[in-house]
Image (cartoon, rainbow, N blue to C red):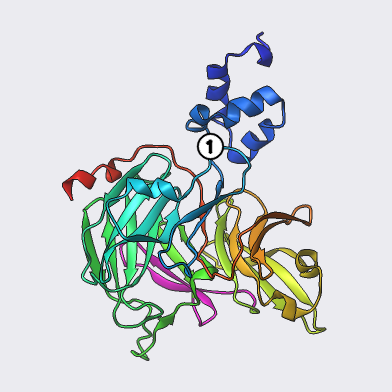
């Protein structure tokens, strides 16, 4: 019987490619040789990928430039020049990131922009045809699940924060067209009802073929790519503005909650049974574990970043210098990652590389 040490690198990579992400990361601790094989750029294309870092755009700059912060400590750095692969533009604004693909708004002039979906890992991109809202800054989000299909969808809401009778436009890479969908959240007893978005720091999740995002009504609005499913999921507890994320295959809700005795708790809920909409408390701890103090006023300057897609870890920025920190729920440990600096208020987009080439991103020469 052959020992592990006698396996060739190619055969070892073939075996490791069948492991889940969490097991693969444990294998990096086996030896320096294994770590080198797993982290090698060529091999990484064949292995399961996990969170590599965050894209963000400091909005205070005269010409917004996408920035990438790597949180793994391995792999090649991704920086703004990678957007040189996109068509000629004056500036780029990142709107959404989903399973390795990025949705960008590329400005060509003061009132002229178009949507581009790109894959930074492969350099592929495609320019989308204009929607009926061309020239209007709408809320647009990306939906993509490579485990289900190579096709992606773009959801565009024609009103930035108040989604009323206007409904939404949905682009499908399968048809190459935008389709209008009437608003299905309107209450039949009150046709003036609308959905008001919380803001870009609260995250949005593409799960089970549906887009999820927080609303000012203290629930999660849900709509599918066909515009046939419109529903709301009640939130478990209220406090400060929370965060929704997909982690380990489930929808999570993270929040800070002030208790009756004036303490502040970090609470993490998971929706293990998606159909029953029953939230389960997964984790809770005193906010002092993260901020070092119990005064609720001290957490007002924080900003949610993300929850790790493959493990029980939360990322957020703290302090006036926007220090990016991670909180490991399993070990109650906080680690400072880097100082992002400034007082900007960017939207952070978690990025997991996708090295698969997609036919849906090979249409750029037709535009």
Q: Is residue 214 left or right of residue 248?
A: left
Q: Quadrant of the N terminus?
A: top right
Q: Is residue 264 left or right of residue 248?
A: right
Residue 282 to residue 218: above or below: above
Query: What is the x, y in percent for residue 307?
Result: 60, 58
Residue 52 to residue 284: above or below: above
Residue, far top: 1
Is residue 172 visible in the rendered image? The answer is: yes
Residue 101 to residue 231: above or below: above
- Closer to the camera, 150 or 228? 150
Asked which quadrant contains residue 335, the reply is bottom right
Residue 6 to residue 316: above or below: above
Tell me what residue is drawn at x 40 percent, y 37 percent.
356
Query: What is the x, y in percent for residue 286?
Result: 79, 69
Is residue 258 visible in the rendered image? The answer is: no
Q: Which residue is denoted by mark 1 in the rendering?
A: 48
Residue, far left: 366
Query: What is the x, y in percent for residue 226?
Result: 30, 62
- Closer to the camera, 163 or 344? 344
Q: Is residue 332 left or right of residue 204?
A: right
Magenta stretch contains residue 220 = yes
Magenta stretch contains residue 177 = no
Tell me what residue is drawn at x 81 percent, y 75 percent.
294
Disc 1 residue crowd, few under 14, some 14–19, many 20+, Cα 10 Å: many
Query: What is the x, y in percent for residue 21?
Result: 59, 39
Q: Which span is picked out in magenta? A: 215-237
């Amino acid at each position: 019987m052959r020992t592990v040490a006698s396996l060739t690198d190619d055969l070892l990579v073939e075996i490791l490619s069948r492991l889940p992400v969490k097991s693969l990361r444990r294998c990096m601790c086996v030896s320096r040789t294994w770590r080198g094989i797993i982290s090698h750029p060529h091999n990484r294309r064949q292995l399961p990928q996990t969170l590599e870092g965050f894209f963000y755009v400091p909005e205070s700059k005269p010409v917004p430039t996408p920035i990438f912060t790597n949180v793994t400590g391995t792999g090649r750095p991704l920086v703004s020049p990678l957007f040189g692969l996109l068509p000629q533009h004056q500036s780029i604004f990142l709107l959404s990131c989903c399973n390795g693909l990025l949705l960008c708004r590329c400005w060509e002039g003061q009132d002229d922009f178009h949507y581009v979906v790109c894959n930074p890992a492969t350099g592929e991109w495609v320019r989308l045809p204009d929607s009926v809202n061309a020239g209007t800054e709408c809320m647009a989000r990306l939906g993509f699940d490579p485990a289900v299909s190579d096709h992606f969808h773009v959801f565009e809401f024609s009103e930035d924060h108040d989604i009323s009778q206007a409904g939404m436009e949905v682009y499908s890479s399968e048809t190459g067209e935008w389709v209008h969908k009437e608003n299905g959240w309107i209450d039949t007893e009150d046709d003036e009802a609308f959905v008001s978005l919380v803001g870009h720091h609260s995250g949005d999740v593409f799960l089970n073929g549906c887009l999820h995002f927080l609303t000012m009504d203290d629930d999660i609005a849900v709509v599918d790519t066909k515009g046939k499913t419109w529903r709301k999921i009640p939130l478990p507890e209220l406090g400060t503005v929370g965060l929704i994320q997909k982690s380990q295959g489930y929808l999570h809700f993270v929040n800070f909650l002030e208790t009756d005795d004036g303490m502040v708790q970090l609470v993490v809920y998971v929706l293990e049974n998606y159909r029953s909409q029953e939230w389960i408390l997964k984790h809770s701890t005193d906010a002092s574990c993260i901020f070092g103090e119990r005064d609720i006023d001290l957490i007002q300057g924080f900003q949610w970043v993300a929850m790790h897609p493959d493990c029980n870890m939360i990322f957020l920025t703290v302090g006036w210098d926007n220090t990016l920190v991670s909180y490991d729920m399993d070990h109650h440990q906080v680690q400072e990652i880097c100082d992002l600096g400034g007082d900007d208020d960017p939207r952070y987009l978690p990025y997991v590389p996708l090295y698969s080439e997609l036919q849906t991103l090979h249409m750029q020469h037709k535009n």
